[in-house]
């Protein structure tokens, strides 16, 4: 797989995903991804995107301002 930004080499890696829901900031650690070795562009597989959506959906109504979750702990 090559990077769609710079055509660099994409390698399997882990990243921290962050999303601002307005009333809550979600931080998901250890998310498996493909990372470009040249520009650092990150892309996720469809499976990972679905899991991220599920995790975020579950946190939507939480009253915490900052939610930090570990991807590998949520997706077993
Ligand atoms: Zn790149």
Image (cartoon, grey):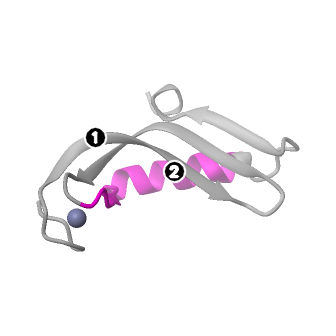
Query: Residue at 69% of width from left, 59% of height from top?
Result: 20
Image quadrant in which the N terminus is located: bottom left
Q: Residue 57 at x, y = what percent?
A: 66, 53
Identify the magenta region.
Answer: 39-58
- The residue where tag 2 is placed is 52
Horizontally, residue 47 falls left or right of residue 1, namely right
Q: Residue 40 at x, y = what percent?
A: 30, 56
Q: Which of the numbered marks, if any, corresponds to residue 32?
A: none
Q: Residue 18 at x, y = what percent?
A: 58, 52
For residue 68, above or below residue 42: above
Sequence-first tag of 2 and 1 = 1
Query: Residue at 67% of width from left, 48% of height from top?
Result: 26
Which image quarter has ligand 1?
bottom left
- The residue where tag 1 is placed is 13
Query: Which sits in the foreground, 9 or 25?
Result: 9
Q: Is mark 2 within 8 Å of ligand 1?
A: no
For residue 39, above or below residue 6: above
Please say whether residue 75 is one of the residues in the magenta stretch.
no
């Amino acid at each position: 797989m090559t990077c769609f930004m710079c055509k660099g080499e994409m390698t399997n890696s882990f990243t921290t995903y962050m999303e601002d829901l307005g009333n809550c900031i979600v931080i998901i650690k250890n998310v498996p991804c493909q990372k470009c070795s040249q520009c650092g562009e990150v892309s996720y597989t469809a499976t990972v995107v679905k899991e991220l959506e599920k995790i975020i959906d579950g946190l939507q109504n939480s009253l915490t301002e900052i939610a930090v979750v570990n991807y590998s702990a949520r997706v077993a």
